[in-house]
Image (cartoon, rainbow, N blue to C red):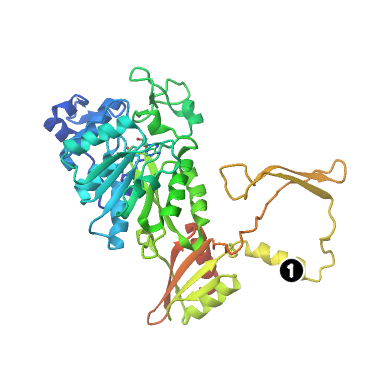
Amino acid sequence: MSQKNEMHPRNPYKNKPPDFKALAIEYPEFRKFCHYVSNGKVLFDFKKDAAVRCLTQTLLKKDFRLNVELPTGHLVPRVPQKLNYCLLIDDILKANEITKNVVGIDIGTGTSCIHALIGARHFGWKFVATDGDEKSVQVAHDNVARNDMNDSICVVHVNPAVKTVLIDVINSMQDSDFSFCMCNPPFFEKSEQNDRFCEEPSVSQDTYTNNLSSEVRSAPHSETIASSAELYVDGGEIAFVNRIIDDSVCLRDRVKIYTTMIGRKSSLKPLQQRLQRFGEDVKFMVHPLNQGKTKRWMLAWTFAKSISLTTLIKDRPVSLQLPKPAIMRIMQEISRLDGRLTQESSSVIVAEFKSVTWTNQRARKKANALLLGNLTKRPKWDTSNVACEANMGVGDGRDSFSDAGNFVESKSISTFKEFTVDNATQAYFPLPPGETPRPIVRIRINVNSENLFDVVSFDLIFGSKQHLHQLVQYLKNLLCR
Ligand SMILES: C[S@@+](CC[C@H](N)C(=O)[O-])C[C@H]1O[C@@H](n2cnc3c(N)ncnc32)[C@H](O)[C@@H]1O
């Protein structure tokens, strides 16, 4: 399903896709990839890599006055998607009043140098653009020079074998602080090589295509041809972004806002969990980046106390109408749910929860009654028919991308023959001394007095939207009767 309407509201391509007919009339090289059909419409062949390459070059020329070389065998950036990413960064910068002398770092700029070129031309930002591939650095440098942008963009070659991706570059520029960094990391782990892409020797030994000649997979909507450095990295995008996170822990607010694009939904959770481990020191957020049929995400984080990332959360605050005085009743209920309350003003409170206590209330009550009540048949807590054996890995157990510290094997052993047991095992690891567990959800509650009632709105500071909606529903059931 097309996700055009989820594009950034300021993206000019949001409600106005490229007019292929007009482009075909204006640009003869673009015309070669168009077919006229009987109703006068122009069809564009997205399936061919050369056509997509030409579309990107034409849009950059027409809409950004950029003359960009995109060599065959390398990724072709999609202009609306790249603009979406820059616009989101622009939103965060503007919301934090960072509007002058904006300097960004583009990690892994590729041959196109696309983020830096669009960022400099459209938003007036300056850039340091890095890449680990010498050819990409050369082509990116030529693209910058061809567009007379040497004063705004400095392209730097970095050693991709070095574990850090930001520290060396930043330390080589002693006096500069950076407003933000951005990155479109290689997504895939090397072992996935054969699943998604196959070699394309007609271009070069190092070129891959997603146009697999397989009976199982249908042909892709649009062909992607790329080099191995653009597609693969040890550990995939999770490992790459973890390297940026590691660097950010050392660099702290020498970069005000760290951002990266994320290509796979499954990468979001481990990366957010990783950031969560830095407790109150770090703020982070995820925002979707949609274009066409592709869904991507931007992960942003900051160590700077002055930076707010919540300004980007565009969801309407969830609200309830309650009889007056609503704030007292809300505070009572939140305390009953083991929430911690901080009063910010007479009408604003912040509530945080370390666990979800508002779901399964009936089951909770029943379990409590069983434990505390005077039932004739009480469970015998001190006897067991089952023994449990678990083999653990080494490490602190909190990294989900290795076996370290997680269960290697876990089994339940019945003390009766022919007696089977279900086995569910959960482990808790003590936090290092001095570290306090971070709440799973934090919500700002704002109470506005109207004539006859109070309007209570709930804003998610962090945590899952699902938890917020469940909690509000729970309070509604309880307080709106
Ligand atoms: C997916 S491509 C992104 C290219 C371009 N930024 C875009 O969005 O179209 C990833 C890029 O990261 C580069 N890269 C890989 N490891 C790197 C490292 N350690 N430091 C900098 N760049 C790296 C690759 O050479 C490749 O050009």
Residue 55 vs residue 415: left or right? Answer: left
Quarter, ligand 1: top left
Q: Could you tell me residue 295's position as x and y percent? A: 39, 42
Q: Is residue 19 visible?
A: no
Determine the image quadrant of residue 450: bottom left
Res. 232 image quadrant: top left
Residue 373's place in the image compared with 139, above or below, is below
Residue situated in front as seen by the camera: 432 or 384: 432
Furthest toward the left, the residue is 26
Residue in view at x 56 percent, y 70 percent: 339
Crowd tier of the residue under label 1, counting other residues whose Cα lies within 10 Å: few below 14, some 14–19, many 20 or above: few
Residue, disc 1:
369
Q: Pinpoint residue 377: horizontal percent, then vertical percent.
A: 84, 64
- Which one is in front, 158 or 45? 158
Q: Residue furthest top?
A: 202
The one nearer the camera, 164 or 41, is 164
Tag 1, which secondary structure? helix
Q: 410 above or below 89? A: above
Position of residue 134 relative to residue 242, above or below, is above
For the point 39% across and 44% down, the residue is 296
Q: Is mark 1 within 8 Å of ligand 1?
A: no
319 is higher (above) or lower (below) than 430: below
Query: Percent position (x, y) of residue 371?
Result: 76, 67
Q: Quadrant of the N terminus?
A: top left
Q: Tell me which residue sits at (36%, 62%) in the image.
A: 307
125 on left or right of 335? left
* Count of marks overlaid on the render: 1
- Asked whether residue 337 appears in the rendered view, the answer is yes
- What percent of the width, then of the height, locates residue 452? 40, 82
The amino acid marked with disc number 1 is Ala
